[in-house]
Amino acid sequence: MQRRASWLRQAHGIALEDYEVWYNNQNGVCYLCHNPSMDGRSLAVDHDHTTNEIRGLLDRTCNTTLGIIEKRGPEWIANVVKYLHWEDEVKRHLGVL
């Protein structure tokens, strides 16, 4: 517990009590997917890497995914959506859909 409190203070400038307030306000679930941490670990403190402002608590998968999205940018997100639906586009083009 002491180690976690020290890490939260050093990494995010918050006390363990602050983390617990965030956690309780989110009902112990990830802000994005609304699931509890799937790996049994505590939720990650998500923050803006430019301002260091805390945005909320995320499970590890959502936190990692969000980091990738932020690095790649909005055009990449649009390409992912197109990629996931490419089969529909091909079918539409062929008149099958």
Image (cartoon, grey):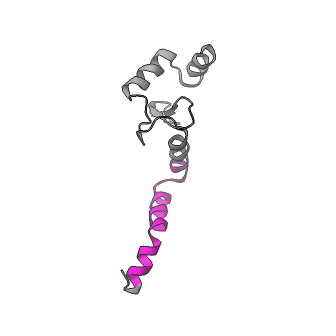
Q: Is residue 75 above or below residue 18?
A: below
Q: Is residue 56 shown in magenta?
A: no
Q: Position of residue 39 (x, y in %)?
A: 57, 36
Q: Residue 17's spot in the image, x, y percent?
A: 47, 15
Most common secondary structure along the magenta stretch: helix
* Quadrant of res 41: top right
Residue 91 visible in this rendered orientation of the protein: yes
Percent x, y for residue 4?
Answer: 60, 20
Q: Which residues are magenta?
A: 69-93
**Quadrant of the image for the C terminus?**
bottom left
Q: Is residue 15 visible?
A: no
Q: Residue at x 40, y 39 (%)?
A: 34
In percent of the image, x 50 and y 43: which residue is there? 62
Observer-nearest of 26 and 79: 26
Relative to 60, residue 2 above or below: above
**Location of residue 15 with respect to 28 vertically, above or below:** above
Query: Residue lying farthest top?
Result: 2
Q: How many marks?
A: 0
